[in-house]
């Protein structure tokens, strides 16, 4: 996956979500899903470009009456996600490092698997 393909990839995923869940493009939930998928994909590309190039990234979307669950997996080398999700808000002066914090702030639940290869993000359907 290349950075220049992320926008079209995210748009295709969201088109399917809108159709399946009758979700309006203007709603906050749509924006939250879009932002979360975008941030995870860009992090894979920026922080593990080799994995982004040679490992397929899989996005699974499930829903219940109350939640939408995203699982984004890339079987690259993973990363130590704990040090990024357990810290407080990043400094506004930082040029990087806000994406995971933002996802954690806007989602109902956000975590990674043990190796940092799979992100699991849950949003309330409202």
Image (cartoon, rainbow, N blue to C red):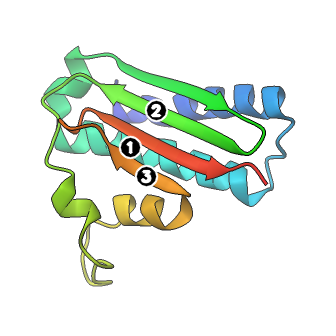
Q: Residues within 10 Å of mark 3 (few under 14, many from 20)?
A: some
Identify whether 93 is placed above or below 53.
Answer: below
Q: Residue at x 60, y 47 (%)?
A: 33
Q: State the residue position of label 2.
A: 71
- Which label sits on residue 110? 3
Left-right relation of 20 to 107: right
Give x and y (percent) for residue 124.
68, 52
Residue 46 sits in quarter? top left
Q: Residue at x 22, y 61 (%)?
A: 84
Q: Position of residue 120 (x, y in %)?
A: 43, 40
Q: Is residue 107 above or below residue 114?
A: below
Tag 1 residue: 40
The residue at 65%/40% (across/down) is 68
Q: CA distance from mark 3 to mark 2?
A: 10 Å
Separation of marks 1 and 3 at Cα, in angstroms: 12 Å
Q: Quadrant of the C terminus?
A: bottom right
Q: Are marks 3 and 2 in contact (CB under 8 Å)?
A: no
């Amino acid at each position: 996956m290349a950075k220049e393909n992320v926008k079209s990839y995210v748009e295709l995923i969201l088109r399917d979500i809108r159709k399946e869940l009758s979700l309006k493009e203007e709603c906050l939930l749509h924006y939250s899903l879009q932002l979360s998928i975008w941030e995870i994909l860009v992090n894979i590309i920026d922080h593990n470009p080799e994995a982004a190039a040679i490992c397929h990234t899989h996005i699974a979307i499930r829903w219940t009456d109350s939640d939408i669950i995203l699982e984004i997996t890339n079987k690259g080398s993973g990363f130590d996600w704990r040090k990024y999700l357990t810290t407080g808000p990043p400094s506004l002066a930082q040029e990087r490092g806000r994406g995971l914090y933002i996802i954690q702030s806007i989602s109902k639940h956000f975590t990674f698997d043990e190796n940092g290869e799979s992100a699991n993000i849950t949003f309330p359907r409202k």
